[in-house]
Image: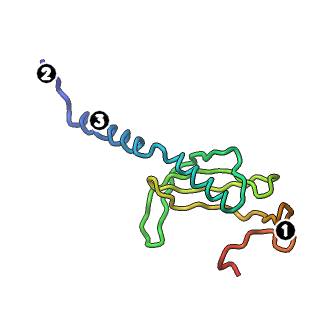
Amino acid sequence: MGISITLGEVVAGLLLLALVAWFWRGRGVRELALQHVQARCRIEGLQLLDAYVAFIGWRWLTSAGGRGRLVRCYGFEFSATGVERRSGWLAMHGRQLVSLELPPYPVTDNGTDAVQNPFRQLPGDD
């Protein structure tokens, strides 16, 4: 009257355990992503709207060296002037920030909209 377990049940159990461990290891990544976004918005002088990042899915990103990585992607909204909403996203590989993308946004100068160059210039865009 022993318990009989098939090899398929053992493999399924190990896969389930590995999946749970993978998600457990990734806990707290969203909070870390939020900290990265808050720091970037503070540096850029932007307002993070709704004070959250939302998980938008998984992506396969290729690094400059040609190595592929499966990353978690999070979306967020920010404003440069307090009037419009713009969407950005960031990618996290484990607990490491891989990419943080902000679309072009109007630059303000002492609270007034800049008229000569309404969009932020990145180094090397000359």
N-terminal label among 2 and 3: 2
Q: CA distance from mark 3 to mark 1?
A: 60 Å
Mark 2–mark 1 CB contact (< 8 Å): no
Q: Residues within 10 Å of mark 2 (few under 14, many from 20)?
A: few
The tag on residue 13 is 3
| Residue on which disc 2 sits | 2
Q: How many marks?
A: 3
Q: Residues within 10 Å of mark 3 (few under 14, many from 20)?
A: few
N-terminal label among 2 and 1: 2
Q: Position of residue 43 (x, y in %)?
A: 66, 61
Q: Which color scheme is applied?
A: rainbow
Left or right of 23, for residue 51? right
Q: CA distance from mark 2 to mark 1?
A: 78 Å
| Residue on which disc 1 sits | 114
Q: Residue at left 43%, top 63%?
A: 68
Q: Residues within 10 Å of mark 1 (few under 14, many from 20)?
A: some
In the displayed structure, 97 sits above or below 29; it is below
- Quarter the N terminus occupies: top left
Q: Amino acid at mark 1?
A: Ala
In the displayed structure, 75 sits above or below 16; it is below
Left or right of 30, for residue 13? left
Q: Which residue sits furthest top?
A: 1
Q: Nearer the viewer, residue 63 or 53?
A: 53
